[in-house]
Image (cartoon, rainbow, N blue to C red):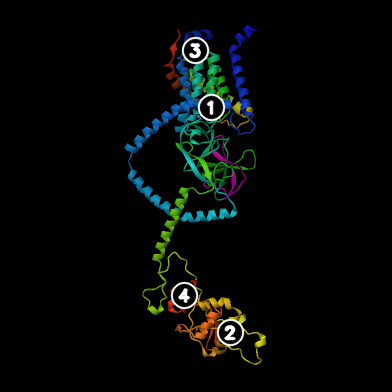
Amino acid sequence: MESFFSRYRNALVLIAVLLVQVIGLAVQVRRPEPNAADGHGVRLIRSWVVGLVTPPERLLHASGHGIRGLWANYVDLVHVRQENKSLKSELDRLRLEEDSIAEDARQGKRLQVLLGFQEKYVYKTVAAQVIGTSGTEQSQVLLIDKGSHEGIKPDMPVITPDGIVGKTRDVFRHTSQVLEISDPTSGAGVILEKTRIRGVLRGNSWGQPEIVNVSPDERIQAGEAVLTSGGDAIYPRGLAVGNVERVKPDPEGTLVNVLVKPAANLSKLEEVLVITSTSEEMPTQAQQDLSEADQAEQRASDVLAERLPSRVDPNAPPDQQEAPEDDSADEGAARPVKPPQALHPDRYTPSDTPPAAELVPGQKITNAQSSAVSGAANPAANGAAAAGKPAVSTPTSAGTSAGSGTATKQASSPKPKPKTAPPATQAGAKENPGAKASGTQGAASETLQPQPQSQTPKPETSQPQASPPQGRD
Amino acid sequence: MVLMASSRHEVGAKSFPLVIYIVVPLLALGLQSLLSLHFNHFDLIDLPLLVTIYYGITQREPVSATMVGALIGIAQDALTHHALGIFGISKAVIGYMAASLGVRVDTENHGTRLLLTFGFTLAQTAVLWLLQRDMLGQQFAWHWFHELMRAVANAVAAVILFAVLDLTRRSDY
């Protein structure tokens, strides 16, 4: 027996080592959930190895970064001025684009509120430097220099300004693993920007992300933008993922896979952002940007309004010009809407006709009768208008109506001359402020309508019509 | 030149300072992780595999080579998101094979090292393929051209790396 062990010692050791590892593999693979966290022992081993490997990486990365910075900031400054100029012009262009997009953003937000969507805004991010990779083709994993001490937790999205990178996986104290979207075990909910086709993005065996199991659709064209859909509850909705590169048939079925060229350069990552917090409220900075865009848009519209031709022609004769607006009014106050001038006086109001019991067969209804009837029928509506106007000349034909003491009259002549009303009429108006002002001009009778600006006496034109009538008498 | 195992072991056995046993694998893991970040196709080369092969063919002790291979492989697994043991098993097998061949083959020759590394790289991929595809049910694509290129790249890198590591050896005889 002893000779057996000594004879096959090497092979037995190999078998024992393999057996232990296979058992360990089986224990790790058999988890209650497919994506459950590692066990304590496995996590400890990973932590030890990462703790041993990453300090030299940090040192090398920092020294390399310092050398590159020295070169880039003090030596390699060729074309910087030209680049600065082009960046400024690009900034101006982006400001203009921002102005035009701001309104769309607000409209989209309103519509989302109406539809009950809950937008997730990127509220807080942590910038991290990429200090290493897994070093193998089978595992598309990055190492970043931020960990739980900096507030990072597993399954947090990792992005760059260009697009998404992946999500955090194992998080250690000062280091984290990031599983890239190009790994076959990753997954992200995405949507095609134009065709609105949804799918799941994951890496293929070549390390290229692809949207798997998509129904064949001729509308999917190369170059179409791919965005996150937010359906995976990890990546916020609307982040750039990449562009469609081509469509290839799925070898295992009738569906197709859409190859995606990532927006972020996954092979040349140096700095990334980890989204540590999302919010349903727009971040303060974004709100400031939006308000600045609003102000810029307002300024642009003001400039445009100044350059447009005015309604008042300065070269026209004074009698052909419209009455100027009252500039003394508060600029911020809402200006009342002025109704257009009526083309014809109102003769067909139903309440203008007296009751049938008062009518005499063969007698023609006079305007005064009908006006008196309508004024009595609707005293409240017309009284306010009558109270807001100074009394004007009383016609002689209004004897019957004047006898009732309920009516005052305002002539509808284009430029009436204000007159003081008789005391009886004034008293009647005061006793019954709701009385209707009516009058005649020739054979026509009319109810008091809101007067257009051009027909009202000059002192009234300077006051908004919605102003309280008290104090006008 | 092929010699008997006993004579090969007596003629060429050399050892390393203890610190080299610790520093070189860690350096290989760190460089692999760092250089893959800055060079697109550097992940074709497997520095931990080369170190495992080197220890195997120079020490010619299958037990220690198996243990070293297993430890290096597990450490490499720890940097990935895979379960621990995938690279551990494959590198333990490679370490054992390298040590077993090292006692029978002249491993000081660059041509022999080139061929051995070429074969061991393919062997490791085969073990990984078996483990991931058949045991774990994971996706693992085998592309012949790609694997041959990987084997060639590792073989060339091994010749250079082994020459550098030879400088750290000390003769026991």
Q: Which mark is residue A46?
A: 1
Q: For mark 1, does the 10 Å Cα neighbourhood hold few (<14), some (14 to 19), or many (20 or more) residues?
A: many
Q: Nearer the viewer, mark 1 or mark 3?
A: 1
The residue at 44%/18% (across/down) is B165
The magenta stretch is A195-224
Element at label 3: loop
Chain ID for label 3? B
- From the image, state whether disc 4 or disc 2 is nearer to you: 4
Q: Are the residues flagged by discs 4 and 3 from a single subunit?
A: no
In this view, A281 is above or below A142: below
Residue A80, given in percent of the width and then of the height, sits at 34, 43
Mark nearer the N terminus (4 vs 2):
2
Percent of width and height locating residue A142: 50, 33
Judge whether residue A217 is colored magenta.
yes
The CA distance from mark 4 to mark 2 is 27 Å
Q: Which amino acid, by three-letter code, is at mark 3?
A: Met
Mark in front: 2 vs 3: 2
Which dot, 4 or 1, sits closer to the camera?
Answer: 4
The answer for which chain carries disc 4 is A
Kind of residue at badge 1: Arg
Residue A129 horizontal side relative to residue A33, left or right: left
Q: Which tag, 1 or 2, sits closer to the chain's start?
A: 1
Residue furthest right in the image = A357
Decide: few, some or many residues near mark 4? Use Cα within 10 Å; few <14, some 14-19, many ≥20: few
Give the residue at mark 4.
A471
Mark 4 and mark 3: Cα distance apart in space: 122 Å
Distance between mark 1 and mark 3 Cα atoms? 43 Å
Q: Which residue is mark 2?
A: A372
| Tag 2 and tag 3, C-beta contact below 8 Å | no
